[in-house]
Image (cartoon, rainbow, N blue to C red):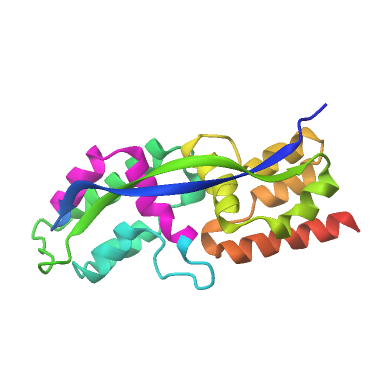
Amino acid sequence: MSEPFVFQTERHLVVLTGRKARNLPELLDHIINVSGSSIFYHTHYLHLTQHFVKPRFNSEFADWTSYALQEERLAEQLAAIDMLAMTSIHNLRDAIVAVVRNYVDVHPLFRECPRGDEFHFCEAKSFVMPTGLVAETVPAFFQQIPNITNASLHFHFFEARLRLERPTNDFSQWLTTFGETKIAKRIDQLNPYAMTLDELKAEIGRMGRKYLR
């Protein structure tokens, strides 16, 4: 018998690493050497903070290279990395490093950012805890979706798959254990990077209402 789904949430303690970059070579060096937590933070934190408006760039690396260095082509290349194809932080770091390194090789004359616009590397310490919401059955699971917070959705959709290196998001994985492979696959095929968390929750809720009919 399948275990009930326990909705989790998390709290973040954001800390400065002491690393900062003024130009592309420094940015590249730090990306290679910072913790995986820092890589995840700078590529996913905006998903959690932007509830209603999708930012131009979800990656803070892309955002900084655009506004601080005026390297618009590099920013677009960083933003174009296929996040859904990433299966771990290691894969994501390698993809970012490859894009920046190739760009630096082709453009050896690099800009320095204005003073005060340095890229400061941060990382987030995560504390995971239950929300108190539990679903014993698939109908109960979908009935709970409107009640979950964006932080809980972010954990089960982004953190679980990439930082914990699970094969899919927690929702699809759990639904599959109940034999609900069709709707599990449909949820897995959603692109959470192309929408806000509110839009993602609304779409899953819509799928749930259709399932419950």
Most foreground residue, 182 or 158: 158
Residue 164 screen position, x and y as percent:
50, 35
Residue 154 screen position, x and y as percent:
55, 52
| Residue 213 visible, this angle | yes
Q: Is residue 208 left or right of residue 158?
A: right
Residue furthest right as drawn:
213
Q: Is residue 87 left or right of residue 186?
A: left
Most foreground residue, 73 or 67: 67
Q: In this view, does 151 lie to the left or right of 122?
A: right
Residue 23 lies in what quarter of the image?
bottom left
Most foreground residue, 76 or 194: 194
Extent of the magenta region: 25-48
Queried whether the magenta region covers residue 142, the answer comes back as no
Residue 33 screen position, x and y as percent:
23, 38
Asked if residue 113 is positioned above or below residue 36 in the image, the reply reads below
Residue furthest bottom as drawn:
53
Asked if residue 208 is positioned above or below residue 158 in the image, the reply reads below
Name the residue rendered at 20%, 44% in the picture. Answer: 30
Queried whether the magenta region covers residue 33, the answer comes back as yes
| Residue 95 visible, this angle | no
**Which quadrant of the rendered structure holds the C terminus?**
bottom right
